[in-house]
Amino acid sequence: MLSFLYSSVFIGGYLTSVVLGLVGLARRRLLSSAWVLLLVPIHWLLLSIAAWQAVWKLAYDPYRWDKTEHGLARTSRKVEQVDKSQQPAQERIGPGGIRTSSAAVEAA
């Protein structure tokens, strides 16, 4: 009896998540990406593992935490700033044949 209840709650939750995902993808016209909704149970498993890991760390090492470094995506503004600061200034030929460095142009 309990196994029926557990499985029906799991299937009901999965179907609800899939329907909501399909609605969101349809609104954004991204239904071609709907196959990723099959991975929802794996996502739930990974969330559960992360939650149990957090409880373990809170119980056994409450004054230390794993910090996330932000801005590492290729599209991040922080990466663009780091890339620009690490590159040497490039010379550009401006109007009238005047040579300027890219650092001077960006500062202006």
Image (spheres, rainbow, N blue to C red):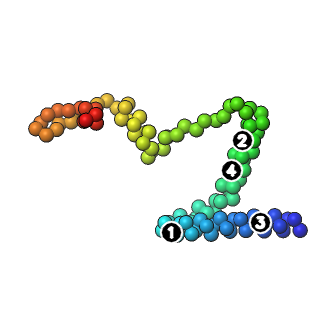
Q: Tell me the amino acid under the disc marked 4.
A: Leu
Residue 87: horizontal and vertical position, in percent? 34, 32
Q: Please tell me the numbered disc located at residue 54.
A: 2
Location of residue 90 by image quarter: top left
Q: Amino acid at mark 2?
A: Ala
Q: Which dot marks residue 85? A: none
Query: For numbered disc 4, what is the local secondary structure?
Result: helix
What distance separates the C-alpha of mark 3 from that of mark 4?
19 Å
Check the picture and name the quadrant holding the N terminus: bottom right
Circle nearer the N terminus (1, 2): 1
Residue 39 is situated, as x and y percent measured from the top left of the image, at 64, 59
Residue name at image x 85 percent, y 65 percent: 3
Answer left or right for 50 relative to 67. Answer: right
Q: Which residue is mark 4?
A: 46
Task: Write down the residue under mark 1.
Answer: 27
The CA span between labels 1 and 2 is 35 Å
Residue bearing mark 3: 9
Q: Quadrant of residue 108?
A: top left
Which of marks 4 and 3 precedes in the sequence? Answer: 3
Cα–Cα gap, marks 3 and 1: 27 Å
Residue extending farthest to the right is 1
Q: Name the element at disc 2.
A: helix
